[in-house]
Image (spheres, rainbow, N blue to C red):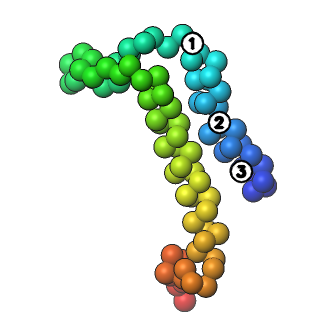
């Protein structure tokens, strides 16, 4: 597959959770569980609706780093980031 097509697919997959959250944002209750104990009972609740964006934002940041690191490593000053060559 073409790299541009794969990058577009990645971008769409990264933006999909934000779109789904946007569609259902009004239906999110005021307090909702965010952590469960070993028996499956909720032991931490959040009243901050913005906490629902935590995982999609982490995914986006990781993807940006994965996209930018090869571009940064190609510069001469960052040769330590390049993988070693095997002769």
Distance, label 3 to label 2, CA atoms, is: 12 Å
The secondary structure type at the circle numbered 3 is helix
Give the vertical position of 24 relative to 65 (above or below). Answer: above
Distance, label 2 to label 1, CA atoms, is: 19 Å
Asked if residue 11 shows in the view, the reply is yes
Q: Residue at x 71, y 50 (%)?
A: 7
**Corner quadrant of residue 45:** top left
Q: Which residue is mark 3?
A: 7
Give the vertical position of 9 relative to 67 (above or below). Answer: above
Q: Residue at x 61, y 30 (%)?
A: 18
The secondary structure type at the circle numbered 1 is helix
Q: Residue at x 57, y 12 (%)?
A: 26
- Between residues 46 and 14, which one lies in front from this camera angle? 46
Determine which of the numbered discs, if any, sits on residue 15 in the image. Answer: 2
Q: Position of residue 79 (x, y in %)?
A: 54, 82
Asked if residue 83 shows in the view, the reply is no
Distance, label 1 to label 3, CA atoms, is: 31 Å
Determine which of the numbered discs, if any, sits on residue 26 in the image. Answer: 1
Q: Mark 3 vs mark 2: which is more N-terminal?
A: 3
**Corner quadrant of residue 22:** top right
Please report contact status of discs 2 and 1: CB closer than 8 Å, yes or no. no
């Amino acid at each position: 597959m073409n790299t541009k097509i794969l990058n577009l697919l990645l971008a769409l997959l990264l933006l999909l959770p934000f779109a789904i959250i946007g569609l259902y944002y009004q239906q999110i209750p005021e307090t909702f569980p965010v952590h469960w104990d070993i028996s499956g009972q909720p032991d931490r609740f959040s009243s901050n609706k913005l906490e629902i964006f935590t995982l999609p934002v982490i995914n986006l940041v990781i993807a940006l780093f994965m996209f930018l690191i090869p571009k940064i490593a190609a510069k001469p000053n960052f040769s330590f980031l390049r993988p070693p060559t095997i002769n």
